[in-house]
Each structure stands twice: as C-alpha cells, then as structure tokens.
Image (cartoon, helix red, strand yellow):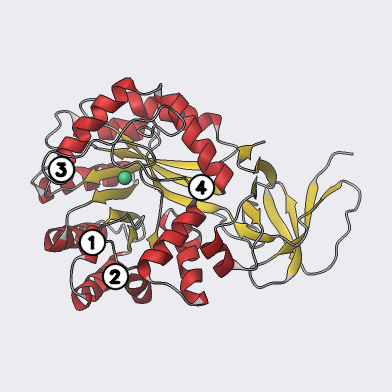
C-alpha cells in the first residue's frame, strides 16, 4: 500500500501542548491533541517533544551576488564614507573573480534551507551592465530547488533605472521572463528623480500586474519623503498590500512622532517595511511600526558579498538580531521578533497557505527550545526542516 498520509507525533506547539500533525498531499490535514497511532498507509514520524515552528520566511536576499561558500573576498571600504555607486562598482569587480553565479546561488540557498527557510524573496540584478543574464541563471536555480523552497524573484535595478540605459525595458522583459516583482533603488539619491524612477517601477507593476519591492537606503527626511511618494503610488494604483520598502533607514532617523505619522500612512497605503537590523546603522523602529499596524518583515539581505562580510542565512538568528537591536526583552517582544521572520513575512510576501494551521502547506522547522522566546534568544541548532511534509534538511545539510 502506498503511503498517503504522514503523522508527525509529539510535536510541541508554541503554547506548550504536544500535538499530532497529519500531513496529506503536502498540506496539514489535521492537528490533534490526541495520541494518534498510524493506521495502514500512514507513516509515523515521532518528533519527540521538540518544538515545531512554521518555516521561516527569508524576505530579502541577493542570490546572485553572494560569495558564501567560495573563497573569501575581503571587504573594501569606500574612499570617502558610504557611497552606493562605489559599492556597486566594487561589486562588479568582485563578480568577475568569484565562482560561477549558479554555484554561489546554490550554496546560499542550501544554507538558508538548512537553517529553516521554506519561502524566500530574492532581488536579482537587472540593469544595463548584466542585462537579463543574472536573472536567467537564478531562474534555472530556482527551478532546481522548487521542491525545497518557494522563491519570489524581484527584478532589481542595481545600477539605477534612469542612469543605466535600457534598464526600464530590461525590467519589463525580466517580468516576462519569470521575475515576480519589480524593484527599485534609491529614486532620489541614485537616479536623482523620484517621479521618473517611480513612474517606471509602478508603470511596469501596473502593466504586468506584479508587486513592488524597492530598496531605499536614503536617510532622514529624504527617505521619508520617498516613502510617502511610494505610499501615494500604492494607493493611486489600488496596490495596497502589494508594495514593500526594503531598509527604509530614514524611518530610524526621524523623531518618534514623525515616525508614527509615517507609520499611519504606511498602514493606510498597505505598504510593508523590510528591515534586517544592520549593525551600526539606524533602522526602522520595529515596535512602533508594528503597534501602528505596519507589516514589518525581514531578510538576510547580503551574505558574504561586496556590501558586507556578515550574514548566515538564519532567519531565527535574524529575529534575535532584530530583538537585540530593538531592545526587546519581554516574551511578547521576543514573540514579535519571531513574527517578523515568520507570519509577518508571509503576509508581506502574500504567501498562500502559511502557518501551523489546518489546510496550510506542511512547511515547518523542528528544534530544541522551550518555546518561541527561548528559540529567539538561544537560536538553537540542530534543526530539522520539512517542506510540504517532506524532510529536506537535517543537522545543517540538505538530505
Ligand atoms: Zn538588498
């Protein structure tokens, strides 16, 4: 008889109860508190009282530019303070000496999956310098890993849109080729034309009916001004819930009352905020934004690349970093940090069938922790990762 259902017994849920999760056809068919013993055609996996958590959501990563797993490439500081243009130039130099992109992307994906990410949004460079080559490579890699992780790809104009000839057309073609979202990059400081930049981004979004995720490093009121423009565009096109601003450092630079006003605008416009709580940098006030109702999600962003040498592809560790840098101490605050890398991420990415609930995709992580707050501060390993109810990674490696 073929196995049609799998019973995951003695799964400790975040509320401390031991339950049995029945998985059928890759989905959670039932969650029961009874001791269930497998019948015919049912495989039984005893989770032994370990904590079960929903698969982590890696909401912002760059699969095309990481050197993770390859030879070490030392970080080169900018000549005079931080300069996005110079960093992009360094990136081009580094890409020329790194391993082939597909090799690097696989290594980074395997790192993320082994750490428990079952869904991901990756920005892939699309501009006049690389054309659609990076996207073509990452699309192939995505296909190879389709049973292990769900991946959304963003057409990311790393060299700007207006400053890099041909980029608007390339971004549009990127969507036709298989990218899921249209991206953007610092409309004011990079392209020096907020209107012109957003015309292209939202023009493609409207034409192709795709979501938007814009990199915005601009600080202070310039960053906040741009956020307001993005909010207005989202409302004008009826794209509430389909637009994200990544980094949004400006929100961390302004006074709290101003941040609260912007937060209300973000909520009204249904624009979510991605932060990876980077070191030595102001970042959005996570608690303030969440209290206002803003969807705040997170990602590893850069891992061993031309921007910084940090990153480990561990979204549970990312929750710890967010909590640590936000001064989160109470259980409720630690649970909020966890929400950022799980449910809030799922909502920002508009993932279908997410969570440890009946009917959801059977994507989950099993590890040793008392409960969620303990998991966030301890960042325990080893982990066992299931995608659609199938074991995909164990002890830091794909199976
Ligand atoms: Zn990024």
The nearer-to-camera label among 4 and 1 is 4
- Report which quarter residue 285 is drawn in: bottom left
Q: Are marks 3 and 1 in contact (CB under 8 Å)?
A: no
Label 4 packing within 10 angstroms: few (<14), some (14-19), many (20+)? many
Disc with the residue nearer the chain's start (2 vs 4) = 4
User: Does the CB distance between marks 2 and 3 fall below 8 Å?
Assistant: no
Residue 83: mark in rendering: 3
What's the CA distance linking mark 3 and mark 4?
31 Å
Numbered label attached to residue 182: none
Dot 3 or dot 1, earlier in sequence: 3
Q: Nearer the viewer, residue 199 or 193?
A: 193
Inter-mark Cα distance, 4 to 1: 26 Å
Crowding at mark 3 (Cα within 10 Å: few <14, some 14-19, many 20+): few
Which quarter of the rendering shows the C terminus?
top right
Residues marked 4 and 1 touching at CB (< 8 Å): no
Q: What residue would you read off at disc 1?
A: 231
Labelled disc at residue 119? 4
* Rendered residue at 52%/75% (across/down): 331
Q: Which residue is mark 2?
A: 268
- Label 3: element kind: loop
Q: Percent x, y for residue 320?
A: 46, 61
Q: Secondary structure at mark 2?
A: helix
Query: Decide: marks 2, 1 in contact (CB < 8 A)?
Result: yes
Residue at 83% across, 42% down: 3
Q: Verify CB contact (< 8 Å) between mark 2 and mark 4.
A: no
Mark 2 vs mark 3: in front: 3
Residue 334 in percent (x, y) is at 49, 70
């Amino acid at each position: 008889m073929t196995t049609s259902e799998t019973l995951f017994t003695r799964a400790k849920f975040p509320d401390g109860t031991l339950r049995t999760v029945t998985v059928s056809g890759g989905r959670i068919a039932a969650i029961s508190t009874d001791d269930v013993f497998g019948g015919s055609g049912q495989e039984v996996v005893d989770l032994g009282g370990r904590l079960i958590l929903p698969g982590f959501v890696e909401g912002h990563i760059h699969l095309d530019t990481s050197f993770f797993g390859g030879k070490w490439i030392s970080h080169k500081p900018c000549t005079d303070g931080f300069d996005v243009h110079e960093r992009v130039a360094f990136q081009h130099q580094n890409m020329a000496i790194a391993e082939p992109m597909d090799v690097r992307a696989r290594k980074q994906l395997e790192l993320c999956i082994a750490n428990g990410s079952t869904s991901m949004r990756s920005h892939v460079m699309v501009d006049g310098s690389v054309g659609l080559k990076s996207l073509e490579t990452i699309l192939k890699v995505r296909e190879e890993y389709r049973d292990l992780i769900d991946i959304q790809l963003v057409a990311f104009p790393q060299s700007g849109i207006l400053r890099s000839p041909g980029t608007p057309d390339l971004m549009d073609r990127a969507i036709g080729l298989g990218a899921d979202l249209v991206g953007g990059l610092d409309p004011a400081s990079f392209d020096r034309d907020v209107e012109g930049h957003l015309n292209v981004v939202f023009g493609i979004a409207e034409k192709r009916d795709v979501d938007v995720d814009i990199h915005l490093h601009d600080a202070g009121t310039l960053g906040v001004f741009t956020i307001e423009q993005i909010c207005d565009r989202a409302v004008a096109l009826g794209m509430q819930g389909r637009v994200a601003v990544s980094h949004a450092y400006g929100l961390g630079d302004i006074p709290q009352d101003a941040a609260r006003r912007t937060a209300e605008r973000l909520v009204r416009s249904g624009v979510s905020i991605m932060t990876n709580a980077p070191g030595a940098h102001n970042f959005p006030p996570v608690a303030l934004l969440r209290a206002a109702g803003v969807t705040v999600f997170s990602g590893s962003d850069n891992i061993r690349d031309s921007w910084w040498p940090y990153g480990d592809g561990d979204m549970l560790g990312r929750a710890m970093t967010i909590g640590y840098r936000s001064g989160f101490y109470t259980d409720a605050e630690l649970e909020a940090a966890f929400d950022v890398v799980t449910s809030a991420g799922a909502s920002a990415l508009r993932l279908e069938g997410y969570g440890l609930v009946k009917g959801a995709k059977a994507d989950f992580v099993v590890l040793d922790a008392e409960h969620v707050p303990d998991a966030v501060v301890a960042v325990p390993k080893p982990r066992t990762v299931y995608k659609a109810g199938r074991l995909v990674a164990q002890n830091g490696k794909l199976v």
